[in-house]
Image (spheres, rainbow, N blue to C red):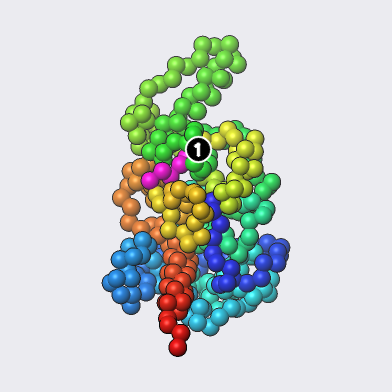
Amino acid sequence: MIHALETEYFGSKKKMALSPSVVPQESEENNANCVETKQSQTASTASEDPLQHLCLASQEVLHKAQQSGRSRCLQCGGSRMFYCYTCYVPVENVPTEQIPFVQLPLKIDIIKHPNETDGKSTAVHAKLLAPDSVNIYTYPCIPEYEGQDHEVVLVFPGPQSISIKDVSFHLQKRIESKSGDKADDLDMPPRKLVRTEAQEGWHLNESMGKGPELKRVVFIDSTWSQTNQITSDERLRELLQVELKTRKTCFWRHQKGKPDTFLSTIEAIYYFLVDYHRAVQKEEYRGQYDNLLFFYSFMYRLIKEARRSGEKAKQKPIH
């Protein structure tokens, strides 16, 4: 999706070899006991903040890091702010144990455009916060999905895109279609498509014993003008496309001329999981994935405040 993060807060754009991701040390219990961030915000400022209701782990470690300035990546030695966007690890003055670990119900594959600037990409947030579930690939490197189109979806807007609530039904149709093809191969009459509760938004593991199981979700990390090269790739063309039609971005680098439903990468991942939890898993959402926006929400407020200060400085009369 749209790239992210203002360059003035991040270091050199020099490319370096990828290193293994950080191993999370914060317990799931600590992750659940989240606290509100920036409690000192005024009521007027909070009312303007679309991320104010997130259930987040304490961001005090980020406040301290922001005050102390750039730090060293312990893997590549690069100078960075908060984390290294090439090694996918926190920097020296951001202890790993103070970064929340988010457990996801699905595997996430992120396909990054080669021209996407590493220091601007919010995709890195997902890898930092959910390292066990997230993999980032640089195009033209794409995982092999052949034969898996009944358990993998691509999140991207388009004329053929469906909503999340219809994912189970369409995956079931693909399974039944494959069963029919196998019957034809054996010179047997194809199995008639069974009309199930999927058409009414049926539960993932109900109806006919167990419904289709979504296992992996693919996201594209790129500026919108560069996405066509990736989405038109034959390795992705057969995947079911899902669009987040009701979510609006609060990304600070929103591209002119694009609708506000075009989300940054980390926003798309977060909102997909929240909607999946409610619409497909049929469970009450209690902030389980809010910490995916741990870095994003902090940067949102930091940049918003910097811009507000800049506007005030411009309006100040010159004596």
Q: Which residue is mark 1?
A: 158
Q: Residue furthest bottom?
A: 319
Q: Nearer the viewer, residue 33 or 56?
A: 56
Q: Nearer the viewer, residue 198 or 69?
A: 69
What's under tag 1, amino acid-wise?
Gly
User: Callout 1: few (<14), some (14-19), or many (20+) C-alpha neighbours within 10 Å?
Assistant: few
Position of 260 compared to 234: left or right?
A: left
SS category of the residue bearing label 1: loop
Q: Residue 316 at x, y = what percent?
A: 42, 81
Q: Residue at x 34, y 46 (%)?
A: 278
Residue 155 vertical placement versus 294 (above, below)? above
Q: Residue 40 at x, y = what percent?
A: 33, 77
Residue 73 vertical placement versus 147 (above, below)? below
Residue 64 vertical placement versus 201 (above, below)? below
Q: Residue at x 36, y 67 (%)?
A: 34
The answer to whether residue 161 is seen in the rendering is yes
Position of 83 compared to 318: left or right?
A: right
Q: Is residue 244 magenta?
A: yes
Position of 167 compared to 87: left or right?
A: left
Q: Residue at x 64, y 51 (%)?
A: 113
Q: Residue furthest front?
A: 319
Within the image, what quadrant is residue 84 found in? Answer: bottom right
Position of 175 compared to 228: left or right?
A: left
Q: Residue 235 at x, y = what percent?
A: 64, 37
Residues in magenta, as a range = 242-246
